[in-house]
Amino acid sequence: MIINQTIKNGFTVVNKTGAYFSLISAGGVVNVSLSEKGRTVLDTKMWVGMSIDKAIPFDEITIKGDDGAVEFWAGDVSMNQSRANITGAKAIRTNKLLVNGLVQLTSSDFTRTAVRVRTNKDVFIGGAAVNGSGWRLAAGTMEEFPVAGVLSAYKAPPRLSIKDSQYIGEVNDLFESGSFGDATGRLYISDDEKTMISWKSGRPKIWTDDNPVWRDHPSFVGVSFTDVSLINSPLTDSIFIVRMTGTNGSGSYSICQYTIYESKDKGRTFGQYAYIDANTKLSQTLISNSGGFLKLVIVGNILTICQSGIAISFNIVDKSWSGIAGKSVPSNFLGSVFYNFIYVSNDSKVCIFLSTQDKKLRRSVDGGISWEEIGGRTFGSIVFADAINYFATPDGSTKTNMLSNDGGQNWTTFGEVSGNGDEDYPIYLADGIWLRFDGQYLKTLSIDGDGNALVETALQTHNPSSTAEDKGYLTNSGIYYRLMNADSGGFLKADKWQLDLKGDLSPAVVEVMELLS
């Protein structure tokens, strides 16, 4: 049988009779000791996938190693022999995940014979508690693990020394004049800084190092837009631009369509990837968009496209989609309008939204059929970074910063206050860390291990030469731009900082194939 235990204070002891033992999942190399009637019959080091090759009767198992979860087989027959008795058609199950920190790749499955794993960056493979001491899987390689239990991957998240981050200088002509006021939502800079895309409304413009002038993006010449937004997609190694077109129906912008364009060359060219006519699945009488501004976020395979009166779940892998209209939520929530919305599961069943009416945060686990309040308070605004890391303010006028690292269930309040709206809210870095400017200071916000607010500040300071946003734009190379409202020929300036980062901000893309029997 498969047994799950937790190593505490360096060891765990299980009373179980058997003759065969296999280590399914662990956080690295462990020491396994098998005893019978008080006498040690086997004492050896083992790692994930190892088994004893012959019958050794035992009645007690002691496992020593790093604290964390451990999973193993112990029985009168070997795990392989037991598995051979299972009948049924052979099949495979595939998945692709982003890894930056610890991520579970598979759950336990007794019908699984092996897992094949491939990665584009170095990761460590092991059990539920794997860290930098597990089995190293090099970038561009594939390995097969004969594991029926939990398999996890770990990529060391980037380590930031905010105190040693440096101001570089001013940069001219960074983004289009008129987009100041959450300009970061209307700007893209490639990691090599050879391509930039910016727009204030309507058609995007592009700047490239080989043609360093701002011009209409050639992929969108003659294309009309009600609104447009852009998002990076590490999972597909691409950039998506979402174009919204729509007209007034029974509600503002209730007749709405979304065209999704994809770029595989860092934004230089785009092609149509998918088209969504929202009214084919959602009644326009239930859509009440007060405006066209799009908010995009990707969690797993799902791109959430959110407006004030509609939320679309688009699967960036198989292109399937579904949606929820604002007026379809229960009337006792006063919930005809979303402020912000996010899908956090690949099946689109788990989703969260903040109502503009009663200012409460609600969660559904059945795709929006029923809702429960979370967070225990009202909110002014919210920013969803990923499935669990959120930023919020307590009300519309008080911009006190609050963070959650458990999907909105609990909140930590900071002494930091943002000046205006979205353009002054922090941006998410990685590993629970948020970045913001505050006057002449560059700061990080995070929640420590005891749930307390932690604020750190760069030693170097700099006062911008013009009115500036506190939010900033961050590239994966650690370049952090602070955007300023200083017009120079129709495009605006920015202050440029270099974060002192150790490691890679971009996640590893890990492909998983489970072999089932």
Image: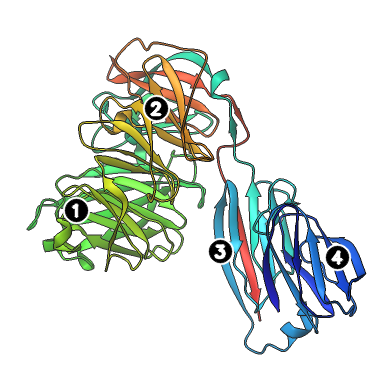
Residue tagged 1: 309
Q: Nearer the viewer, residue 285 or 370?
A: 370
Q: Residue at x 34, y 47 (%)?
A: 296
Q: Nearer the viewer, residue 89 or 174?
A: 89
| Callout 4 touching callout 3 (CB < 8 Å) | no
- For the residues marked 4 and 3, what is the alpha-carbon distance in whole angstroms? 36 Å
| Callout 1 touching callout 2 (CB < 8 Å) | no
Q: Callout 3: few (<14), some (14-19), or many (20+) C-alpha neighbours within 10 Å?
A: few
- For the residues marked 2 and 4, what is the alpha-carbon distance in whole angstroms? 54 Å
Residue tagged 2: 472
Quadrant, the N terminus: bottom right
Residue tagged 4: 33
Tell me residue 29's x, y (percent).
Answer: 80, 55
What secondary structure is marked by label 3?
A: strand
The mark nearer the N terminus, 2 or 4, is 4
What secondary structure is marked by label 2?
A: loop
Q: Which mark is residue 365?
A: none
- For the residues marked 3 and 1, what is the alpha-carbon distance in whole angstroms? 32 Å
Tell me residue 489's x, y (percent).
Answer: 28, 16
Type of residue at label 4? Ser
| Callout 2 touching callout 4 (CB < 8 Å) | no
Type of residue at label 1? Gly
Looking at the picture, does residue 69 appear above or below residue 294?
Answer: below
What secondary structure is marked by label 1?
A: loop
Residue tagged 3: 95
